[in-house]
Amino acid sequence: MPQSAFLSWVIIVLAISGFSLWPEGFVPDTYMLDKLAHFSAYALLAVVPAIFITSWRTLLWVAAGLIAIGAGLEGAQHLLPHRWASYSDLAANIAGVLTGSAMGWIGGRWFVRPASIETDA
């Protein structure tokens, strides 16, 4: 992964972590905007590394790690006043990771690494 992409990804991780632990919440749960925000944030979080990953195994490990981050942040919300953990938020996080990973994998395969595709059995 190029250094600028990695730096951008770290900034995204820090922003999502900060917004997830914001004391009063960041996005209202009106009209499912909260779930859309969770889905979009984790899709963005997953798409950046997935673009540059060349092996399925690595992609699965990265996706599992991102899901663990989402679960950890949901669990941490339970410890904060005026916040609570939500299984539906976690489901939106997981859906975002899976969608972002697939989009990044496909996009990277077509645009970033067409000549250097590895196959993992």
Image: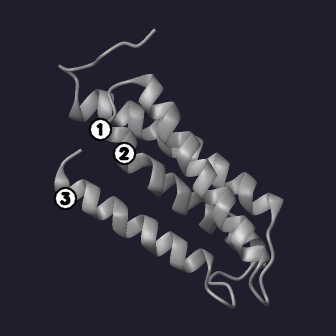
- Secondary structure beneath label 2: helix
Q: Please, which residue is most extreme toward the top here?
A: 121
- Secondary structure beneath label 1: helix
Callout 3 touching callout 1 (CB < 8 Å): no
**Residue for point 58% across, 57% down:** 69
Query: For the residue marked with disc 1, what is the amino acid?
Result: Phe
Q: Position of residue 104 (x, y in %)?
A: 40, 40
Packing grade of label 3 (10 A; few <14, some 14-19, many >=20) is few
**Residue for point 26% across, 62% down:** 7
Q: Position of residue 99 (x, y in %)?
A: 55, 42
Residue under numbered circle 1: 52
**Residue for point 81% across, 66% down:** 86
- Secondary structure beneath label 3: helix
Callout 1 touching callout 2 (CB < 8 Å): yes
First-in-chain label (3 vs 1) = 3
Q: Position of residue 85 (x, y in %)?
A: 79, 69
Q: Is residue 31 above or below residue 113?
A: below
Packing grade of label 1 (10 A; few <14, some 14-19, many >=20) is some
Residue under numbered circle 2: 49
Residue 96 can be seen in this image: no
Q: Position of residue 78 (x, y in %)?
A: 79, 75
Q: Nearer the viewer, residue 97 or 121?
A: 121
Query: For the residue marked with disc 3, what is the amino acid?
Result: Ser
